[in-house]
Structure formats: structure tokens, C-alpha cells
Amino acid sequence: MTDQPAPPESAPEALLDTGTQAANELGEFRSLKADVWRQFRRHKGAMGGVIMLTLVIGGCLLGPPLMGFDTSTPNVANANRGAFDWPHLFGTDNLGRDAFARALLGGRISLAVGFVAMAVSIIVGVLIGVFAGYFRWLDSPLMRFTDLFLSLPLLPILLVTVVLFRDPVQDRLGDNLGIFVLMVVIIGGTSWMSTARIVRGEVLSIKQEEFILASRSIGTRPWVIIMKHVVPNVMSPVIVAASLGIAVAILTESAVSFLGLGFPLDLPTWGKLLDDAKDRISLNVWLTIGPGILLSATVMSVNLIGDGLRDALDPQGRSKG
């Protein structure tokens, strides 16, 4: 009995095997995350920003306890010491507290306000942008609402709102937590407009794609399409907007605190420290330079990271890489 020849592979299976082998040989199976990370690593400014921001955050979290200075109890005998008067790198303030330790301690509050306010801003902006772009009947009222907020002067609105609501909120939540919640809500609630416009434009483009039209044609519910298909595809510009929004929130909090309407006197932030030091700048200029350096380094590093994310998430940039 003669052996029967093996049946030839079907054309689809042969093509699949050939394509898989070629892809494995060329190493072309690269995930999107790997492409983004590789492109981000090549951005020297972004990597420098990551290192700088890590140092600032690590210093703010670990610096004060490691330095061992009492940043709350006054020591008048140690007051107004100059910069580089060991062990006080930036000197001391008028109450004898170490200026460098208080600058690091103030960074905790400023950074917390920046990150939480950014999260509030991104959530509000994404929600309004998605609903305005996907549901045409909501587009006009939501965009007019956005235009209204864009036309308002931000800083005066912040100052008036803090003055009006600071005491009631502090009575309910306490001095420190109350002003923190108030600052986060005000800053986050007045900085979402650019994110909403960006997301709306992306949604208007994505909703015309074939996979969205196919999902709608088979009767998929709108909220399922939004959560599974629309939101994941608009996250690239949202991530960039979030990184830049942190810097804006930190600067806004510092401006409000510098004007004397921020956190209580016993809770230092970078803006509050600059406000306290402005009257004693002739005695020790480092009382202003210290918080200023930390504030500038944070804003610069966040902007560099945002530039790197923008380039890494750009499809044309990834294709060139």
C-alpha cells in the first residue's frame, strides 16, 4: 500500500505561517507601549525632566525627616542666619526655622495641589469634550459653556472665590484640609477648557471611523462605545494636557498663596514662602531663591516631560523611530 502524499497546506495557513516567521525574524512585533517608551527614552529633555522631577519629589518627601530640623517650632536665637551657614544651606527665617527644610516641606503641599487639581481638570475636560463631540445635540450648549469659562479672568475669579468660600469650607473641613479642597476645586474647575476642546476635536474625528460606525450599526449602546472605543483613543492628547496642567496648577496655587489668600501661615507652600520672604529679601535673598529654584525646576521638568510625551505619542514620530 503506497503512502499518500500529505495534503498541501491551505493558502491562508501558509501565508499566516510565512508572515509570522518573517515578523519574528525582523522583530516587528512591537507593542504600542514599547514604541512610546522607546521614543520617550530618546528624548533627552524628557528624560532630564523625569530625573529632575524625581529629585524634587524625593527631596520633598524624604528631605525634611532626614535633615532632622524642626520646621514648626520657633527658635529666635537661631533667627535670620545667612545662606550656607552650616548646617543651614539656605539660612533661617525670622523665627529661626531652617529655610531649606521648609522649602522642601512646602513642596509637598504645592505638588499635591498640582497633581490633584490636574486630575480634577482632566476628568471635567474629558467628560465635557466626549459628550460634546459624540452627542451632537449637546455640542453647542457645552461649547458655549466652555467659551463662557474661557472669557472669565482666571486670577480674579480665584481670589474672589477663595475670599467668599474659605471660611465656610474651613469651618466644615478644618483649616488645612478645607483650604486644600477649596484650592483643588477652584484650580481644577477653572482649567479644564483647553482639554475639553482638544478631546471634542478628537472625538469628532474618531466617531467617523469604521469600527465606531460598525459598533453603532449592531446596536451597541452609546456609553459602551464611549468607554470601550472613544475614551481609549483620545488619551494621547489628554496625557500631554495632563502633564502640562500640573505646571499650571502649581503656578496658580503659588500665585494665590503669594497674594496672601492661600494656605494658613503655619502650613508652608512655595508661594507662601515667597510671600513671607519678600519683606526680608535684603537680609537673606536665599529665602526667596530656595523656593523659587524648586518651583522653577518642577515647572521646567513637567514641561519637558510633556514635550517628550507629545513627541512619543505622535504616530509620525514613532514611525520615524
Image (cartoon, rainbow, N blue to C red):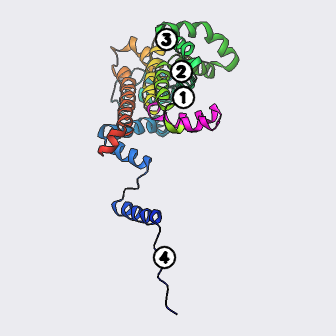
Q: Residues within 10 Å of mark 3 (few under 14, many from 20)?
A: few
Residue 217 in the magenta stretch? The answer is yes
> Disc 3 residue type?
Asp
Answer whether labels 2 and 3 touch (C-beta < 8 Å). Answer: no
Q: How far, Cα to Cα, is label 1 from label 2?
A: 7 Å
Q: How far, Cα to Cα, is label 2 from label 3?
A: 16 Å
Q: Residue furthest front?
A: 1
Dot placed on the residue nearer the N-terminal end, 4 or 2: 4
Marks 3 and 1: which is nearer the front?
Answer: 3
| 231 to 255, vertically: above or below | below
Q: Which residue is mark 4?
A: 7
Q: Which residue is mark 3?
A: 147
Answer whether labels 3 and 1 touch (C-beta < 8 Å). Answer: no
Image location of residue 19, percent across then percent down? 40, 61
Image location of residue 53, percent across then percent down? 40, 36
Main SS of residues in magenta: helix
Marks 4 and 2: which is nearer the front?
Answer: 4
Q: How far, Cα to Cα, is label 4 from label 2?
A: 67 Å
Q: Residue at x 31, y 40 (%)?
A: 43
Is residue 34 found left or right of 216 in the rendered image?
Answer: left
Dot placed on the residue nearer the N-terminal end, 3 or 1: 1
Q: How far, Cα to Cα, is label 3 from label 4?
A: 68 Å
**Quadrant of res 219:** top right
Q: Which numbered circle lies on residue 119? A: 1
> Disc 4 residue type?
Pro
> Disc 1 residue type?
Ala
